[in-house]
Amino acid sequence: MKFGAVAVAALALFFSVAAADPGDEGGDPPNQVTADVSVMATNFQLPFPCGQSWTGNSSASSAHVSWEIDFNRGSTADADLGDPVVAAAAGTVVISSHQGSTNGYGNLVKIDHGGGWATYYAHLNVRSVSVGDTVAQGQKIGTVGNTSKPGNNISPHLHYEVRLGSDYPSNIQKAVFNGTTYGYPIQTLTSKNCGNTTNPYTPQEVCGDGYSVIDSAALGTAGKVYLLYNSSTGYNCVTTLKSTSLGTATATTAYLEVQGSSRVTDSGNFSYYAGPVRASAADKCVKWGGKAGSSTYDSIFEHCT
């Protein structure tokens, strides 16, 4: 293994990159931001293409101060030089630069995932994204390299971090891949970063306890809009759940109109869903609908009892 060479060379490293700033969900309602924090904790995948096996080591580098991981594969020091590195989760690129003499990260990409979550990808040979880019989970962001600050002669590897909040280094979190906490200090994993196609939320989770789905309509392949009812309170609820661009804020809408009352709409750029939109509608007809991608659904006045 080549971690020994990395460890020796890393003695001079001092990781002083600014910590991630807490973020928001690009207009998501407060209830979704709060929920997204818990979802993001288990929504990360290995930062390598689907099916590849990589060995991570959190103990071989003296520069590590917390739960950082150095990843390698292959039997020689340069075996993985130039291999693709992909986004562990969807988000927005907030750093894409060579850190020069500032620290030991070399070519660094930082992705902001919202809710205060961020991932760091260091020592890249090539950076494939720019600041401001929106990236999908599994999208290539660079290649494995050995860039650092002048004088640091390190072997190729990916230095990976997950951070939550801004209090460095206590904000560095244990890495979670495919819903399972990484087996510190050393573990070999096979990437499940094969495209995030399942929305982590259900209509009932969005609308709350006591609500049951009574109708739904597909929005092409982009999502689905749901009408729910709470028989104990007499309230209807509408939410639109996305099926594509999950984790990335895109235009999504949900609305509910009780006959004789004004329409209530939740519309904006959301990561997973629009809504919940609730209104008292016992023994009244409702019109409901939503939009995701280019598809729209609008009901007639219905569900009157």
Image (cartoon, grey):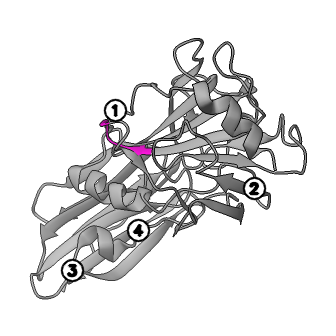
Q: Give the left or right position of residue 115, taking residue 31 as reference.
A: right
Position of the C terminus, as image quadrant, is bottom left
Q: Are marks 2 and 4 in contact (CB under 8 Å)?
A: no
> Disc 1 marks which residue?
21
Q: Position of residue 198 (x, y in %)?
A: 55, 66
**Cα gap from disc 2 to disc 4, whole angstroms:** 30 Å
Q: Are marks 1 and 3 in contact (CB under 8 Å)?
A: no
Instruction: Provide the secondary structure element on which disc 4 rests.
Output: loop
**Cα gap from disc 3 to disc 4, whole angstroms:** 14 Å
> Disc 4 marks which residue?
201
Residue 141 is at least partly visible in this image: no
Q: Are marks 2 and 1 in contact (CB under 8 Å)?
A: no
- Range of residues picked out in magenta: 163-167
**Cα gap from disc 2 to disc 3, whole angstroms:** 42 Å
Q: Nearer the viewer, residue 160 or 246?
A: 160
Q: Nearer the viewer, residue 82 or 29?
A: 82
Is tag 2's residue or tag 3's residue first in the polypeptide sequence? 2
Q: Give the left or right position of residue 58, taking residue 202 as reference.
A: right
Is 164 within the magenta?
yes
